Image (cartoon, rainbow, N blue to C red):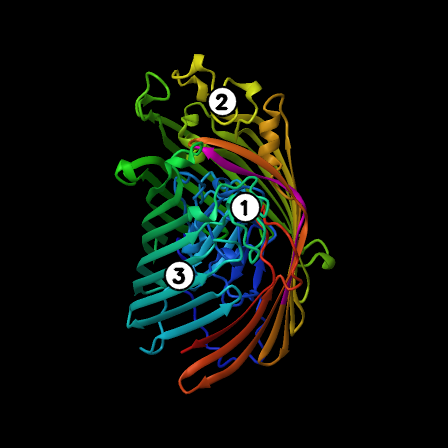
Amino acid sequence: MLLNPAFAEEPVHDVGQIDVTAERKDQQVTIEPQKTTIRLEDYESVGAPQNVGDIVKDMVIIDYRGDSNLVPDDDTLYMRGFSSKRFVTALDGSTIRKTGGRRGSHVVDYALLPPFLIESVEILPGPHSALYPSKSIGGVVNFIAKTPKRRASLKPDAKISLNYGTYDTNNHSASLQGNLGDLTYDVGYQKYMTNGYLRHNEADFDTMFGRIGYLFPNNGYIALTASYANLDRERPVINDPDDPESNYDNSYPKVKAEGRSFYKWQDPTWDKHSPNFRLNLKLPSAFGTWRANAYYGEEDRDNAKWDWVNSKDHDQGIYYDSWITEWRQQGGKVSNEFQLAEGHVTTMGMEIEQCYDGYDDEGGADKKRIENMAGFIQHEWTIIPRLKLTAGLRYEDDTIWVGNETDDGHYITGEDDYITRDWSQWLPKSFLTYELDGLAESLRDTSISAGVSRIWRVPDYHGDYNPQGKPAGAWLDPEHGVAYDLVFNRRLFGDIHMKFNYAYYEIEDYMAENVDPKYGIRERGGWVPPSVRGSGEEWKDYHVNLEEITREGIELQINGHLTDDLYFLLGYAWQDFEYNGDKYEASAKEEIDERAEHFVFAKLTYQLFDSTSITVDFEYQDDQVTETVEEISEDVYETYRTEIDSYSLVGLSIKHTLFKEWKGIRKGVVRLYANNLLDEHYRSTSTFPGTDLTVGTGVSFEF
């Protein structure tokens, strides 16, 4: 019985010195049947990424949906057409999320994840891993932090990067990694500022990071990480020549008043502070490799603006409205990976997530709103040399607390301030891969895979259980269904790999906002007939369970070297959502129409000279219909649907290595770049005008 190969006694043979003379080809992206891995050290981005989300959005499975690509914000990524509430974003295997909500979405803020923290990114399409929570319907994006390591000397490794671009955009960072024997340390700092392309869209971010660790024998370690971010964001405002109140400024793009809430005089902002702490452990042993992490994080966000005391009587003047929401999240995960016999690798573990929130007059983030407790087992079985099954089982117990309190009582009479709802479920997962090499020479390095897994998601997001503060979660049922993936993976020639993935989802009781008053007693905007006010029943259909949503899609990805000097990455994705039901047609249409069908991304990196490379990228997004919601008065919202035309964007980057080893500096690099090179006029998914041509330059030095 072999629990950990690291502790097995194997004969050692001296084969003498081996010299490797071939140059290394940087494979920026590695494709496997069940996941895609991006190595940040090798990946060539156009421009200077502010956060790791700027890198992940190059994958066609990811749809970027921010207001502006110059100002990162919460929940700017969709995966397989699903928002942050239906796919998992993780750091070292532990889910990153908040309760969300409170005048916005706010589940994951990518601005808190600068690239210098991260070594690689794993992208797992679909809900086929038992190691992650059930909300992983679209899949998992797992950011892997840089691993503490030994160095031959006490001299630390340091890197400084300075970048400046259009709209006074500054992106500067510095990092340092070193060790004193088995004691390791890491520190880092990033400064990001921009005036933004849109009117009133400046940003000023400061992010600090520190880690101290201790290295064990056999590649183990324990590390404590602390980070702090201070993020100041302005919010884009109306800039409409036909609206006198906007005081139109022609030096900024036009932003029509329809569907927009703010004017320049209101000075709307989103400001945030966020401290985070994380403890990571890796411990190889004779009984398998143990991994554990624990985390604690806080975020606050100040939704501040000037507003009319009475929107119908401006003579009453204005006042400063500041709504501070606070979030707190904590949890932990422990697992053990062991091998009982050759061809059998098992991972067992458990985890807990707890999410709290609150706003300023409640005394902070002191109310638990979500608790997820889970246990999991996943087994990789090499049935025969070319047939491998990854089968898993996850058990989840999820509890939410639905807010039921109003200023003068309760929404639902006879209930407490918070309504407790609890669900539990067993979730089977499976992914089978068969390598076709043995069938014919023409099928060498070719495999087919099939994934079949249970879908299940409770309303564990503030916008589900307490949308606009209403107790909709008191009536909602969990989503459930099945996800199917069929994958064809092949090495075409050289190091060029191709993966074709067909996916099909059936999701019953899909949660959505009800927009059609004919299916319920409430009217659009939250107004209800006086005869039923006060019973609480008027909110029963505020959000509803749709009968069945199906999602069908394909993803094609090819990458590798056409020549020693020419690397390429090509991706195409298509998706289609359909509703199968007899009621809530308008709600379903609004919920699933807000997605493009076709996506294309292509990248070429050409090593022009030994010290100079050129990277060109291209992205295409199909037309779509999107929705924006305007708060026309307190807790009253109006929805606008906007058609967005298809668009294509081109980026260009030139990187030149100035020197290697010069006066104590190990490497110096200069970069020139341009985004939206052809100055395409387009609208972002949020319907704001997309950023025009931007250029920039940067230098970096390694010590």
Q: Which stretch appears magenta? A: 616-633
**Residue with the mark numbered 3:** 6
Marker count (numbered): 3
Q: Quadrant of the rendered structure where residue 117 is?
A: bottom left
Report which quarter residue 350 is drawn in.
top left
- Locate residue 480 relative to residue 402 in the image: left or right: right
C-alpha gap between disc 3 and disc 2: 57 Å
Q: Marks 2/1: CA distance?
A: 26 Å
- Residue 289 in the image, given as x and y percentages of width and height: 37, 54
Residue type marked 2: Asp
Q: Which labelled disc corresponds to residue 78? A: 1
Q: Which residue bears the numbered disc 2?
A: 541
- Mark sitting earlier along the chain (3/2): 3
Give the percent coordinates (x, y) of residue 525. Answer: 50, 27
Residue pushed farthest front?
315
Q: Which amino acid does label 1 sit on?
A: Tyr
Q: Which of marks 3 and 2 is in front?
A: 2
